[in-house]
Amino acid sequence: MTNLCLTLDYELFGSGRGNVFQHIIEPTERLLTICSEHNVKLSIFFEVVEYWKIKEYYENGVSMGYQCNPADAMKEQIIRAYQQGHDIQLHVHPQWIDAKYTNDKWILNLDYWRLPQLPMQANESISMGLNDLIRNGKRCLEEWLQVINPDYKCNIIRAGGYNVDPSQNLIKVLKDNDFVADSSVYYGGIMNSELSKYDYSELSQEIPYWYSSSFSLFKEDRNESGILELPVFADNIRRIHKYDWIRIKSALKNKTNAVEKFKNNSLKKSKWEMLGFILDKEAVTWDFCLFSTFKMKRYLKKVNKIQLKSSFPFHPFVLVGHPKDFYYSDALNYIIQYNRKQKGRFLTVSETVEKIKSAAVNRPAVCKEELIIDKINQ
């Protein structure tokens, strides 16, 4: 039985580009309709800082080109999604904290692109510190959803852009605010750009989750006293295979943002370096909004092999998606139908955390070093 967790990052583009209705509300509505037809639940990571800024400007008379209140539309959709049984948890991009809307576009604070860069408290360079950000984000969602269900808890987080390194301060703040889990890392992920910096290359696909140490979300604490880490599944593939027709067609739909990303990737690279970059391998996250059916089958084959060898009594796999990328539903429909035929389950992140806790007594004593030894012996 394969346990899949469909997680959705509910947000505009990282640069601030995009239209709330075109890139969030409408594609999320299509996703919710598909999930309703198949009785599948999503885990929606709601980007709360972006919402605060959009709400602030609209209520202060800056329409940003919208005919109706985009913040109200976001809140209404999230509340309705929760009423339908979907899980709602926290997503934060700190570059939005002091964002300004001017000359018909958002100007973000790129000095604070990464969550670990935030000071613990506000200072002269930023109006909100890490403590207030996490506490206020949690409060926002709980005020909305505890009206519907008094037992609802916002206690799981995903950092913007997978940036959680170094995470010692973040772990402390999460524990202080009763968070139990994080889903901000992915297998094999490496990034060293001007904005994003992390190295998750040592993570093993065979380990579906772990309790973090007190200083790092991707280092394991065998005493199981830390924040539970639920990594997004990813596999190493050549970039030339990453850009199949679905991804290219989606990029053409979001042409301005795609061109911007291409310029960032090709910056300071010669033609030969760019060719090498395209032919090189990259850890690509399992994306149910951007994958073709062919690529979905490839990843399913990979996780089925891992599942068969797994010694974990409960072995979940976390997928990721973004409404702004969701134009083609073939791959999502395929994985839903396939997993159902195989008697697999779709779980929310909250359900996944509860399953892990219930399986903890029977969890095998597996560590990264043991897995490395096993591979050598094979």
Image: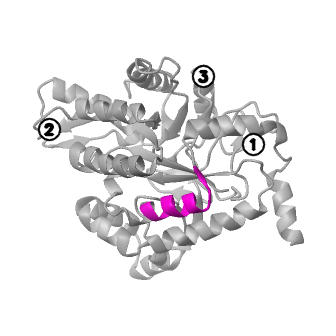
Quarter that holds the N terminus: bottom right
Q: Amino acid at mark 3?
A: Asp
Q: Identify the disc placed on residue 220.
A: 1
- Amino acid carrying label 1: it is Glu
- Residue 281 at least partly seen: no
Q: Residues within 10 Å of mark 2 (few under 14, many from 20)?
A: some
Q: Is residue 205 above or below residue 41?
A: below
Residue of label 2: 64
Residue 292 lies in quadrant: bottom left
Q: Residue 178 got which mark?
A: 3
Q: Nearer the viewer, residue 25 or 378?
A: 25
The numbered disc on residue 375 is none
How crowded is the residue under tag 1: few (<14 C-alpha within 10 Å), some, or many (20+)? Answer: many
Instruction: Pick the quarter of the image with the C terminus.
Output: bottom right
Where residue 174 appears, as percent x and y from the top left, is: 58, 27
The location of residue 95, given as percent across then percent down, is 37, 38
The numbered mark, 1 or 2, whose residue comes first in the sequence reads 2
Displayed quadrant of residue 243? bottom left
